[in-house]
């Protein structure tokens, strides 16, 4: 029985030469519900989130960076959670708090800008400033959530949970002045101008097509012009009527002699030719004159 020779271990896979290194983003992109700006700080991405609030990386128009800690809508509606947020911010060093909103705005979510954070130039000092600001923001949100309070006594009963933990959308915010179009980048400004120009060209083309289609259209014949009545007389229109059934002759004909008429000196025959019998039937039957009393 021969022993099986052990196979040498495969060397670890090495990255392909010449391939660019994989870059890990330092922040997640903003979501549609995230505010584009709080105070003077433009939000650039998400750094973290929990039931108490969100951490954002932000920057001002003049290039000053900061880390923004902002409450969720659930925690912002709780007065006790707002008090814990304010207390945690007051305990931070004064140089670490760059800006914050007014705690008396009960309809808005509380936020605080922590820093300073310099532009990431690859140096260790800039990385340390960013890490310190992020850790301070996490401490503020943890104070609201109360997840770092040491346990006193033994665990009994159900676990503690805030009633607002399911409401994790960013809290209400107010932006003034409006961020548009200052938030647009140069590429976005060019795209906006091109879209406006395209809309103007489409409108001009539509007007040109309408003019080409209707330039040779015949004029609409106006209706008859009725002259104004200056004499004070009324115009009466006479419409010919159809004679009722059973009558002969035309309404325009003059008086004519009937076959029953006799010349002088002759005796009329009651049953002579051309005589018309007396009307019979009901007044409503055709050919019979109605009783004048039936008109009313």
Image: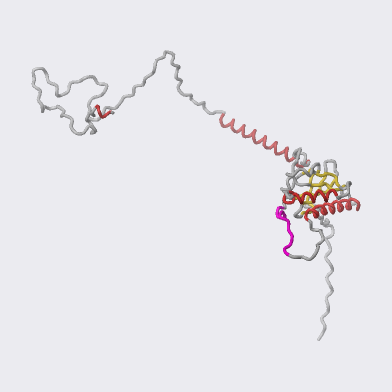
Residue sitting at x 31%, y 24%: 240
> Can residue 189 be seen in the rendering of this structure?
no
Classify residue 183 as left or right of residue 223.
Answer: right
- How many numbered circles does the render carry? 0
The reply to whether the magenta stretch includes residue 120 is no
- Compared with 113, 244 (above or below) is above
Q: Position of residue 167 (x, y in %)?
A: 71, 53
Q: Position of residue 102 (x, y in %)?
A: 79, 43
* Residue numbers of the magenta segment: 157-167
Classify residue 20 as left or right of residue 223.
Answer: right
Quarter-wise, where is residue 7 in the image?
Answer: bottom right
Chief secondary structure of the magenta portion: loop
User: Among all residues in the image, which is located at the extreme front?
Assistant: 153
Q: Position of residue 113 (x, y in %)?
A: 83, 46
Instruction: Depth check: give the residue in front, 71 or 37.
Output: 71
Residue sitting at x 18%, y 32%: 280
């Amino acid at each position: 029985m021969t022993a099986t020779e052990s196979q040498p271990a495969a060397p670890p896979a090495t990255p392909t030469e010449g391939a660019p290194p994989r870059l890990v983003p330092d922040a997640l992109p903003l979501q549609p519900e995230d505010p584009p700006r709080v105070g003077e700080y433009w939000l650039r991405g998400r750094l973290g989130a929990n039931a108490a609030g969100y951490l954002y990386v932000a920057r001002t128009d003049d290039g000053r960076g900061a880390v923004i800690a902002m409450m969720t809508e659930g925690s912002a509606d709780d007065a006790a959670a707002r008090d814990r947020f304010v207390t945690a911010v007051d305990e931070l060093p004064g140089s670490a708090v760059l800006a914050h909103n007014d705690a008396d705005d009960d309809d808005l979510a509380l936020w605080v800008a922590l820093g300073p954070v310099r532009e990431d130039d690859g140096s260790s000092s800039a990385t340390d400033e960013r890490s310190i600001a992020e850790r301070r923001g996490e401490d503020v949100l943890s104070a609201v959530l109360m997840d770092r309070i040491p346990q006193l006594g033994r665990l009994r009963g159900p676990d503690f949970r805030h009633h607002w933990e399911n409401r994790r959308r960013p809290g209400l915010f107010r932006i003034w002045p409006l961020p548009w179009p200052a938030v647009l980048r140069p590429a976005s400004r060019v795209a906006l101008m091109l879209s406006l120009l395209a809309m103007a060209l489409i409108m001009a083309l539509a007007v040109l097509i309408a003019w080409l289609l209707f330039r040779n259209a015949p004029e609409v014949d106006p209706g008859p012009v009725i002259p104004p009545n200056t004499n004070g007389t009324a115009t009466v229109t006479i419409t010919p009527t159809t004679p009722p059934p059973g009558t002969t002759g035309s309404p325009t004909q003059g008086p004519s002699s009937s076959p029953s008429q006799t010349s002088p000196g002759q005796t009329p025959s009651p049953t002579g030719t051309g005589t018309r019998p007396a009307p019979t039937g009901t007044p409503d039957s055709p050919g019979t004159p109605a009783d004048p009393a039936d008109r009313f």
